[in-house]
Image (cartoon, rainbow, N blue to C red):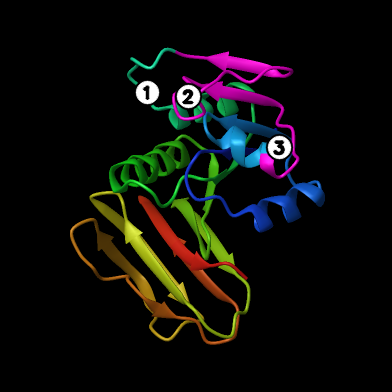
Amino acid sequence: MGVCALVAASDFNREDFCARHAAGEFDYVIAVDGGYAHLESAGIKPDMALGDFDSLGYKPAGLRVAAYPPEKDKSDLELAFDRACALKHDEVVVYGALGGRLDHTLANLQLFAKFSEDGLYVTAVGQREAIRALTGPDVLELPALEAGTVSVFSVSDVAQGVIETGMKYSLDDEPLTNRTSRGVSNELLGKPATVAVESGTLLVFYPLG
């Protein structure tokens, strides 16, 4: 049980990670291939490093390492999710998984949905926003922010019972599909907001406070 941080090789929000690490919010930290370089530059030693290390260029020493061949059926990040599950963590916070190559980002978004549906509480942190995978029935509560946008997309064929409150445009127990742009760019109003879903999986994009 507890919170596992996965640090991959793409754009890294060092400030957010270091603040949460210093506050003791992470019970375990896994460096995913090139994510090890992000942590090394921040002066933070992960609990383990995992991957084929083609991005990093070498296998780290002095810590627990799980090395894989480059020719494999799962990405390094998917293997890191698998390891977090095997270690019985119930929440995963992912850094370095957004930005860079679009195909990699899309693959990562699919992983967030998959592992959310498997019962993990999954949040990905980018430079200016975070993404929460929300599998129903569940509710995400957002703090009061004076400005910013929230976008909500279904990654299921249909997500039923979608509710959005505390924003400029409300949804009240409505369906969203994965073939529409509806849900993009709702506006925060300086008060707490919520996103809820009864069934299916949403990806909720929201600004970092």
| Element type at mark 1 | loop
Q: Which residue is mark 1?
A: 74
Q: State the image quarter where residue 158 is shown.
A: bottom left
SS assignment at label 2: helix
Which numbered dot is residue 79? 2
As drawn, 78 above or below 180: above
Q: CA distance from mark 3 to mark 2?
A: 18 Å
Q: Residue 71, image x and y in percent?
A: 33, 15
- Residue range in magenta is 41-68
- Viewer-closest of 34 and 191: 34
Percent from the top left, x then y, of residue 155?
Answer: 31, 51
Inspect the magenta stretch and tell me whether residue 60 lies in it.
Answer: yes
What is the crowding at mark 1: few (fewer than 14 residues within 10 Å), some, or many (at least 20)? few
Taking the magenta stretch, the answer to whether it contains residue 115 is no
Of the residues under marks 3 and 1, which one precedes in the sequence?
3
Q: Amino acid at mark 1?
A: Lys
Q: Which residue is found at the position 44% from the left and 72% from the top? A: 150
Task: Please state which amino acid type lies under the numbered disc 3.
Answer: Gly
Of 131 and 49, the residue lying toward us: 49
Q: Is 87 left or right of 178, judged from the image as shown? A: right
The label shown at residue 2 is: 3
Q: Position of residue 203 (x, y in %)?
A: 40, 56
Q: Main secondary structure of the magenta part?
A: loop
- Name the residue: 55% across, 20% down: 58
Q: Is residue 68 left or right of residue 172?
A: right
Note whether 53 is above or below 43 in the view shown. above
Q: Earlier in the sequence, mark 2 or mark 1?
A: 1
Residue at 51%, 45% (x, y): give it: 96
